[in-house]
Amino acid sequence: CSSLKNIGLEDWVSVGPSAELDKTGQLLAKESPVGPVLVFGTSKSGNLTAVSLSCTHAGCTLGWKADTKKLVCPCHGSEFGVDGKVQRGPAKEALKTFAAKIEGDSVVVKL
Ligand code: FES
């Protein structure tokens, strides 16, 4: 993607305020620079994970099912765990995951 040309590989980008993450232990960033991502953790847990919400089957945006703690695809029913691993097809490939951390008041993920 040419709009990302000037961004180095080691860059961290903000996906939202850390206060938002602390409220529920999750931060949904629908339009982050890395596409839709869901970040899990809190500013105190020190162990944040960010997982892409783009389904690896055909690219639909996944929804979060709180009761089963799964990411579910509305298009063809694929299911993924919070680690991005496929739990149910037709998707075959794991979701992309990103390193995440708190920087100041922001949650940042590594491009
Ligand atoms: Fe997600 Fe087909 S696009 S299951």
Image: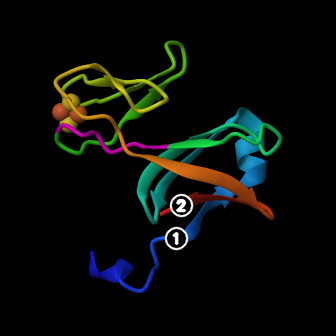
Verify whether residue 6 appears in magenta.
no
Q: What secondary structure characterizes most of the magenta part? A: loop
Whether residues under marks 1 and 2 lie with C-beta atoms below 8 angstroms apart, the answer is yes
Left or right, 84 with respect to 68, comes to left
Q: Position of residue 9 (x, y in %)?
A: 45, 72
Q: Position of residue 105 (x, y in %)?
A: 79, 62
- Looking at the rendered structure, which numbered label has been put on residue 78? none
Residue located farthest toward the top when viewing the structure as drawn: 68
Q: Residue at x 45, y 60 (%)?
A: 31
Q: Residue at x 49, y 13 (%)?
A: 68
Q: Residues within 10 Å of mark 2 (few under 14, many from 20)?
A: some
Q: How many marks?
A: 2
Q: If you read the primary sequence from the N terminus, does the residue marked by circle 1 or circle 2 appear first?
A: 1
Residue 41 lies, with reference to residue 14, above or below; the image says above
Quadrant (top left/top right/bottom left/bottom right) for the N terminus? bottom left
Q: Residue at x 48, y 61 (%)?
A: 32
Q: Amino acid at mark 2?
A: Lys
Q: Secondary structure at mark 1?
A: loop
Q: Position of residue 6 (x, y in %)?
A: 42, 86
Q: Position of residue 17 (x, y in %)?
A: 71, 57
- Out of 62 and 98, give the one closest to the viewer: 98
Q: Which residue is mark 1?
A: 10
The quadrant where ligand 1 appears is top left
Q: Secondary structure at mark 2?
A: strand
Left or right, 68 with respect to 100, comes to left
- Looking at the rendered structure, which numbered label has been put on residue 110? 2
What residue span does the magenta drawing correspond to?
A: 51-57
